[in-house]
Each structure stands twice: as structure tokens, then as C-alpha cells.
Amino acid sequence: MGESMKFTELDQYLFGQGTNYEIYKKLGAHPTTYRRRKGVHFAVWAPNAQSVSVIGEFNDWDEEANPMTKAGPIGVYEVFVPGAKIGQLYKFFIVGAHGEKLYKADPYANAAEMRPGTASKIVDITDYKWKDATWIKNREKFDEKEQPMAIYEVHPGSWKKHPWTEDNEDGFYNYRELAQSLTAYVKEMGYTHVELMGIAEHPFDGSWGYQVTGYYAPTSRYGTPQDFKYMIDYFHRNKIGVILDWVPAHFPKDAHGLANFDGTAVYEHADPRQGEHPDWGTKIYNYGRPEVKNFLIANALYW
């Protein structure tokens, strides 16, 4: 199983073409077994890095403990870390193109720690049994031009809140609680769909999820990826469709995020006239770069 995680020549070819649409199964952190040892396979794209290692709770954040190997000319680095476990935090330590030391969250992480922490978290997102087969089957027959649609747009963090407690200072509802409260409200009001605002991981509450640092991670503010899946499943089983807002237009400059990822413009356009959003103080993607297009298209398909 561990061997199948390796970033192959075919993976590199498709990534270089911008058509490796399941690349999130190879890049990121994936619990697996390699040579009969349990651990995690890590992989990251950092084309102009001098070196990359993975640091985390499994190696006391030691920058030299788990150096990563370059898989080929496209600039993907990978390593298998025996003993790394689900639930542990990690980052990539990158020595950049000009020798700078960068501590980056995983662009393909499936979970992150609660802000203000900025590390990624090892999770297993395959460990959920969906119960929405009936709804999925019926969705194929749904014709939005003919059948009624009434969409309730909601920001999970402010729609409803618990009273303040020391354990839950923000008052956020968990995804599972949201599932039940929202379903009851949506049914009562006669809506057919829920549209969730800014659900991907983001550092700043005030952005309402529209300045994303973790494109492959449902925000930890409201629970785990399992909790998120439960919510989607619950909506579907109650015949409620789900629409997700998606933000491929720009990303924030936070030090742990995509900006200047390996000391050079990797995800953003190098020319600030094309790569900077003056009104928002954010970066704009380099849509002409196949690997960046791949990151975004695969992300839409992932959700």
C-alpha cells in the first residue's frame, strides 16, 4: 500500500499537464503502511526549494529528522514517516530558493489546527460510511431548469451561537449541531438547498472564509472533517441539496500559506501587476501555470 503512495512518473506528467485531477490523493499527508510499518506519507510541491523536510509532533519539530526526497524534475518532495499518527500536527520546513527558512502549512492538508495556530493536522478522511445513496441517485434526475429551487445562504460561524463558556469562547456550533438546527429551519421555511459560505480553512474570522489558506480542509472552527461529512450526509438524507462557496480568485499573504511558497512565486503570478489584489491585500493565482490550474480544478472536484 505504501508503494502506491509514491509520486510516480505518470503523476508528474499529468501534474505538469495540469490534468492530475485526483492529485490530492498523492500530495498532502496520507496515513498508510510501508514495509509493514504504519506511518504517514507526506508529499509537497516546492519547485524552487533548496531542500524540504517535514516537521511535526512526531519528531519534536526537528528540521533535520525527516528530510524529503525530490521525486523528479517537477519539484515534488516526498517522505514516509513511520510512527507518525492521525491527530498529530505538522508543517513543511522549506529552505527557499534564496536560502530563506520557511515554515509552511500543507496546501493539500485535509485538516488544520484551530486558529490562531497555523499547523496542518494528519487525518484519515476515508474513514466515513456515507448513508446518502438515495439522495445521490435522485440528484442525477434533478433538473434545475424545471424543478423548484430555494437556496438558503448561511455563514455557519454567525448563523447561531451558544452562550459563552470557557470551553467554547466563540460559541460556534459544531458541524453536527449545525446539521440538525439548519435542517429543521430549512424544512420549516421550505428551502430546497443550503449554500454554505466560506467553509475551507482560513486564518481570519473577519474574512468569513473568503481568504483561504487550507483549500482541502473544512475549517476546524466547527469540528473535524468527520463532523463535516456527517453534516453533508444529514442534509442529503433530509432531501436538502448543498452548495459550497469556493474561492479560486485570490489567497491571503499569511506566512504559513501559499504566498511565496518556496521563496519564489509558486501559486501567485510573479508580476505584482497581475499577482497582487490592491483592494484586498491578497495574492492572485498564476492561472497560466499548469500545476496551479491543477491545484484549483482538483480542489473543486475534491469538494
Image (cartoon, rainbow, N blue to C red):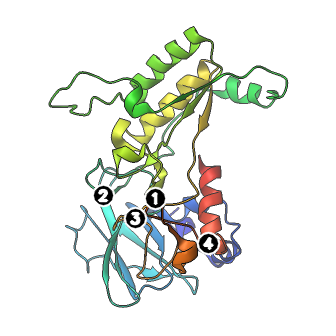
Crowding around mark 1 (Cα neighbors within 10 Å: few <14, some 14 to 19, many 20+) is: few
Report how far apart the C-alphas of labels 3 and 1 lie in the structure.
16 Å
Relative to 234, does residue 274 appear above or below in the rendering? Answer: below
Report how far apart the C-alphas of labels 4 and 1 lie in the structure.
24 Å
Viewer-nearest of discs 3 and 1: 1
Q: Earlier in the sequence, mark 3 or mark 1?
A: 3
Viewer-nearest of discs 4 and 1: 1
Per the image, the residue denoted by label 1 is 280
Q: Earlier in the sequence, mark 4 or mark 1?
A: 1
Per the image, the residue denoted by label 3 is 257
Q: Amino acid at mark 2?
A: Thr
Crowding around mark 4 (Cα neighbors within 10 Å: few <14, some 14 to 19, many 20+) is: many
Q: Nearer the viewer, residue 291 or 15?
A: 291
Q: Is residue 165 visible?
A: yes
Q: Amino acid at mark 1?
A: Trp
Q: Amino acid at mark 4?
A: Glu
At numbered mark 3, what does the secondary structure look like: helix, strand or loop? loop
At numbered mark 2, what does the secondary structure look like: helix, strand or loop? loop
Q: Amino acid at mark 3?
A: Gly
Per the image, the residue denoted by label 4 is 291
Report how far apart the C-alphas of labels 2 and 3 lie in the structure.
9 Å
